[in-house]
Image (cartoon, rainbow, N blue to C red):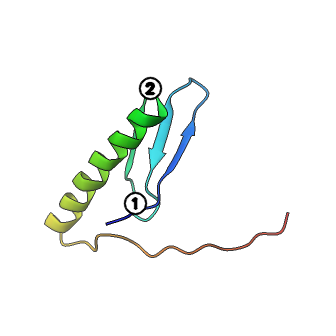
């Protein structure tokens, strides 16, 4: 499966990764590449846990346009 993830660098220099359609699914790494690998593991673990708990694997997401 393919998942959209967000990866950004925080104020301490760590790279934070999250998967917005899986609530609470986050990870981090010292490099962008490490964060990317770690979020893949986190996604697998989150999906497994959600299945064990009888929860849907993902929540719906949509993009909206905001005028600024």
Q: Residue at x 23, y 64 (%)?
A: 50
Q: Looking at the image, which is closer to me, 13 or 32?
A: 32
Mark seen at residue 23: 1
Residue 38 rendering spot, x and y as whole percentages: 33, 40
Question: Is 67 rendered above or below residue 28?
Answer: below
Residue 45 rendering spot, x and y as whole percentages: 22, 52
Label 1 residue SS: loop
Q: Residue at x 44, y 26 (%)?
A: 30
Q: Residue at x 73, y 73 (%)?
A: 65
Label 2 residue SS: loop
Residue 28 shows up from this direction: no
Position of the N terminus by quadrant: bottom left
- Tell me the crowding category of disc 1: few under 14, some 14 to 19, or many 20 or more residues within 10 angstroms, Cα based: few
Residue 47 rendering spot, x and y as whole percentages: 25, 61
Residue 60 shows up from this direction: yes
Residue 21 rendering spot, x and y as whole percentages: 43, 65
Q: Residue at x 40, y 62 (%)?
A: 3
Question: Is 34 rendered above or below residue 61?
Answer: above
Residue that badge 2 annotates? 30
The image quadrant of residue 34 is top left
Answer whether labels 1 and 2 touch (C-beta < 8 Å).
no
């Amino acid at each position: 499966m393919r998942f959209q993830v967000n990866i950004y660098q925080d104020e301490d220099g760590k790279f934070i990764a999250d998967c917005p359609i899986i609530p609470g699914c986050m990870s981090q790494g010292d490099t962008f590449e490490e964060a990317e690998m770690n979020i893949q593991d986190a996604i697998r673990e989150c999906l497994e846990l959600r299945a064990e708990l009888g929860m849907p694997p993902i929540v719906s997401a949509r993009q909206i346009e905001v005028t600024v």
